[in-house]
Amino acid sequence: MATIGLLDTTALLDTSKVGAEAAKALEKAWADAKAQPEDKKRELLAQLEQRRAALRQQLIDRARPVIAELAKKKALHVVLERGAVVWSTGEDLTAEVIAGVDAGGPLKV
């Protein structure tokens, strides 16, 4: 029988220190762009969306080795996204993954 770990990636992205700091930087950039003409705002919004996607990927990439290390340490056979699971007695790894990701310092915004 497989031993299961669970990870809430939304919490990882939204509540990790590095994720929240990256989001604040993007929010500030958007607030600064609001004074621009409408066509410029659309261009800046597209650029900000690309930066947002890159930051999300950077955060997930940083989390992968943390998840792998925890899975090995806890002898887990699989780690699933919490939102994709209807019911489980699996161990929630979210807080430990967030701590490991935050230990890596800020993302490159």
Image (cartoon, rainbow, N blue to C red):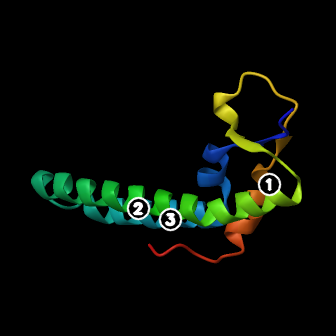
Amino acid carrying label 1: it is Ala
Residue 30, located in which quarter of the rendered image?
A: bottom left
Determine the CA span between mark 3 and mark 1: 20 Å
Determine the CA span between mark 2 and mark 3: 6 Å
Q: Would you say the residues marked 2 and 3 are in contact, meaning their CB atoms lie under 8 Å apart?
A: yes
- Identify the element where label 3 is drawn: helix
Residue visible at 69% across and 39% down in the picture: 80
Place of residue 64 in the rendered image (x, y in percent of width and height, measured from the top left) = 63, 60
Q: Earlier in the sequence, mark 1 or mark 2?
A: 2
Amino acid carrying label 2: it is Ala
Q: Residues within 10 Å of mark 3 (few under 14, many from 20)?
A: some
Residue wearing tag 1? 71
Residue wearing tag 3? 58
Residue wearing tag 2? 54
Mark 3 or 1: in front is 1
Place of residue 73 in the rendered image (x, y in percent of width and height, measured from the top left) = 87, 60
